Image (cartoon, grey):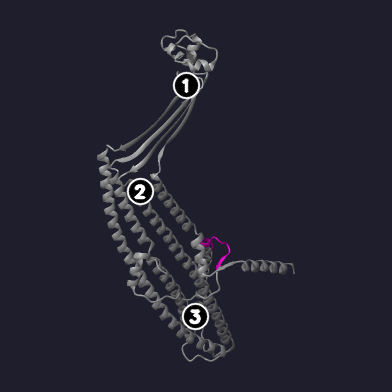
Amino acid sequence: MRRLAVVAAALSLFSAGEAHAARYTLEQLIAKVTAEYPGVLAARESLESARAQLSQAQRSWAPSGDINFWMTGAGNVRCADAKGYSSPDKATREANCITTNVVDLHGGGAGLSLADQLDNIAPTHGIALNFSLSMLQPLYTFGKLEAAAGAAKAGIDAAKGAVDAAKADVIVNAIRAYWGLKWARAARDVLEEGITKLKEWVTKVEDEMESSNKSNYTEADLARLKVALDNAEVVLLDIKRGLAVAVTGMKVLTGDPQADVDEGELDLTEATPRPVEYYEDAARMHRPEARMLDAGAQAAHWWKRWKFSEMLPDIGIASSFSYGYAPSVDNPANGFLAHANTLGASFALVAHSPLDFGVRLGRLAQAAADERAFRERRRQALGGISIEINKAYADYEEARQREKTLGHGEKVARGWYNIVDRNMSQGITISTDSRELTDAARTYFDFRIRHLQAILDTNMALSALHRVTGVE
């Protein structure tokens, strides 16, 4: 009883786990992977990076420059009244300040004690502060900034194509996982049905051979059935292995440990018949790789323009401001800022031109050659895309026609199999050769599995055709 209770509990847990399994339809599976698959997310982040590069290029028109602030020690430099006036009052002394003791120090240190001279040499009596600001506002760059923005926009177009390509790839993988899992289960069910029927036939043949001395079956007939049974079981093992791999692939693809497909049957994906020319025309507009090639050509063009503009000067407005402050240093004859050592500003129209024209000419020639090379590679790639389209179209047409033929053959084989099975179940002596038992079963189940495979191949070929053309 305890063992039965444990088994019942285990079965209940298994059933509960199955109840919580996420069963995706094909549309739900595609929506999930295109929204959450790491490859798609990475491509989207690359698109954000490309947009940030465009933002950088557009902001290059803003002023650029530097802000500096520094602090250091300062000496105790005080006023030495040249008029001979000396007052203990600091404000009065500074108001009449003409020279400082630095003048005396440069003159040999007359009037200064050794301590005063050392104070000027080693600044330990205060701090000196300095603040400076320099800016350059570009006015005209002969196309440098426009070229940078154009190249960045081409980068965005290429990144958008990469996102679409990542989505298209993961959609193909999702379709393969969805239909592949359904095919593996359908093939498993077919083989299990065939194995059950073969076991039933083996039992009947054995019973007839044991109960009658005039049996229509021989040892060879029985051996033939048993060999067919063993072969079916071996094939079933391979199908179950593929099924386990397909289940794992579904979980990895979705990132969901409970992922599974819906209960629908393996069936053909509906598609409107179209000529191959339709797909060739569609690919030029919709296939992500074709759009990425166009974006690459634009980027190469803007890169060449950028290198050309580097041969020309930049025109802008340069401005600067500086302010220095040392409270331990008296400023002679200042009047309004007793301790400001420096205060200045400048404003100028500037033109900057490179002098390494030889190097820049070489870069321009390289960029021009790169543009021509990319243009030819684009032509080559578009030709390769055309070959891919024609191959995918031929694969789809072959799979579609094969599915029709195998579907018809399965129906005929099913009729033959039903006749043989009915005769066996009714105990009717088969008038034909005893090989008909295994032949009928083998033919039917072979056609059935091949038909399922053809359905899978047709769906996958259609998916591949959509992938290489960029259309649904």
In the image, what residue occupies the spot 31% across and 47% down? 143
Q: In terms of image quadrants, where is residue 316?
A: top left
Bounds of the magenta span? 251-260
Instruction: Tell me which amino acid carries mark 1.
Output: Gly
Task: Tell me if I can see residue 434 in this picture.
Answer: no
**Helix or strand or loop: what does disc 1 sit on?**
loop
The N terminus is located in which quarter? bottom right
Can you give x and y, in whole percent of width and height, for residue 250 in the image?
Answer: 52, 64
**Observer-nearest of 9 and 335:** 335
In the image, what residue occupies the spot 43% across and 30% down? 322
Pointer 1 residue: 335
Q: Callout 2: 10 Å neighbours few (<14), some, many (20+)?
A: many
Instruction: Tell me which amino acid carries mark 3.
Output: Arg
Q: Mark on residue 148?
A: 2
**Helix or strand or loop: what does disc 2 sit on?**
helix
Q: Mark on residue 224?
A: 3
Can you give x and y, in whole percent of width and height, for residue 210 in the image?
Answer: 58, 86
Marks 2 and 3, the one that precedes in the sequence: 2
Instruction: Tell me which amino acid carries mark 2.
Output: Ala
Which of discs 2 and 1 lies nearer the camera? The answer is: 1
Q: Callout 1: 10 Å neighbours few (<14), some, many (20+)?
A: few
Marks 2 and 1, the one that precedes in the sequence: 2
Q: Are marks 1 and 3 in contact (CB under 8 Å)?
A: no
